[in-house]
Image (spheres, helix red, strand yellow):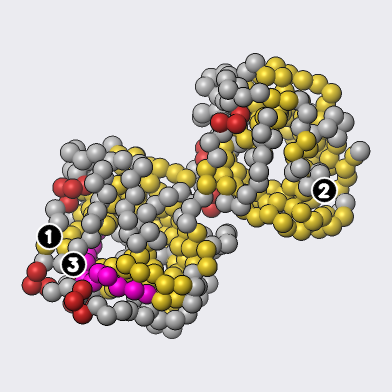
Amino acid sequence: MTKRLTSLLAASVITIAACGGDDAPVVGSDADNRDDTSQRVELAITSCDPNSVNFTPGVENAYMPLPVGRRLRLEGDDDGEAVVLEIDVLDRTKTVAGVHTQVVTETEFHDGEIYERTFNYFATAADGTLCYFGEDVTFYEDGEPVRTTGSWLANGQDNKPGIQMPAAPTLGQSFYQEFAPGVAEDRTSITATGLTQDWSGGRFDDVIELGDYNPLEGQTERDAEAKRYARGIGLVADGPIVLTGYRARLNELSGASCDPATQTFSLTIDHPYLPMPVGKRLVLEGEEDGEQIRLEIEVLDQTKLVAGVQTRVVTETETIDGELFERTFNYFAQAADGTVCYFGEDVAFFEEGIETSRQGSWLAGAAGARPGIAMPAVVRADDWFAQEVAPGIAEDRSLVEAIGQSLATPAGDLNDVIRLGDWNPLDGDSFLDAEPKFYARGLGLVGDNVLRLTTTSP
């Protein structure tokens, strides 16, 4: 984990819970809660040994919880540079030393330029200890990657998982956070407990302070840099860099509404943001890399039986500079609660009028695939869901990024628009890489990162 500061993709600072503030931390009376270095308690990293410890995804460390979608943003001035630190808990895991770890990204910006990006790998032991299994680090200059110094992974041999946060942090505890000899050997101690910290957005009680230092750089405890963690939140201060906002989590929708074994469905699809009356036609157009893109969507007077459910057939035809590029037959049905469910697609790609591939085609009920959510019954910001559930073939996901938006299109200015962010985990993407799609009430899809609605009928 980066030793001082780290942040995240400057891209989407999704609205995060009020917590801002330029004020310096205000610490309560803590004279009795400061570390006495004569009373050190060394914690053994065997508490994170993958050969003897059970790791439980549902367990969260009190001072560093990692629910998917949590975002922390810290800002401040460090040696005259404006530093931004964003930390995101991704919807991704990585197997390290045989353990499924949670991926947490950090990206650090100096004066608006990316300086460092790190992918950290954590797992929580059954007792609540948060264990650190390694990191992939990239440093940047002028926006270009230049080195990966400090990267390491636990390997079950010399490199061992360290303790990121004890299950019950106690004054005087000391431990290795990283244990990769000669590469990463960061240590830390619990130097204060029971602190309070005031912000313009509120107050955090039950704050602890850790002192981090790197022996490989000749540092000792005297050189330790203070980091503060609030119960239920996580990192709230890293030296002069302080928390300015956070989002607690993203809410995953289970997809149970689209289960053919337990739900009933209708061919009448009248969702406010994704209506599909027979005969409906939308045309979206735009330019990308000098090429003219046109997407035509039509709701056909046709049905298809998929996984025992009669679905409505909707075609999408994409052309590039007038040449057919892709034609897709999509299959939808609406659940009783109003969720629009996606039962699969038959995809064909073309070059010079000749079909070249059917990659990405899938149907619920075949090869382990099941219906996904095309649009939830109730659209709420920070909800995310699987649109396609065809393992290894189509696993697209979507996040409700914003509601109540406006969008200018050639077909007119639209209000009551929602913005979804779509991404494909099979490409190694997470919600941080999501591409926008815009849906307008009563119309459906009206734009993405390139296209805008030009024609609608009837």
Residue pictured at 79% horizontal, 40% vertical: 295
In the picture of the structure, the residue carrying the numbered disc 1 is: 42
Query: Considering the image in quadrants, where does the C terminus appear?
Result: top right
* Residue 301 pos. (x, y %): 84, 23
- Specify the quadrant of the image occupied by residue 314: top right
Query: Considering the image in quadrants, where does the N terminus appear?
Result: bottom left
- How far apart are the alpha carbons under marks 2 and 3? 60 Å
- Span of residues in magenta: 184-197
The magenta stretch spans residue 61: no
What amino acid type should be assigned to the residue bearing mark 2? Leu
Of tags 2 and 1, the one toward the viewer is: 1
What amino acid type should be assigned to the residue bearing mark 3? Leu
Residue pictured at 56% horizontal, 33% vertical: 255
Please state if 168 lies on the left or on the right of 87 as rendered: left
* Residue 96 pos. (x, y %): 31, 42
Residue pictured at 68% horizontal, 29% vertical: 336
Please state if 304 lies on the left or on the right of 117 as rendered: right
First of labels 2, 1 by sequence position: 1
Residue pictured at 58% horizontal, 62% vertical: 15
Task: Give the tally of numbered discs.
Answer: 3
Q: Secondary structure of the magenta portion, mostly?
A: strand
Q: Secondary structure at mark 3?
A: loop
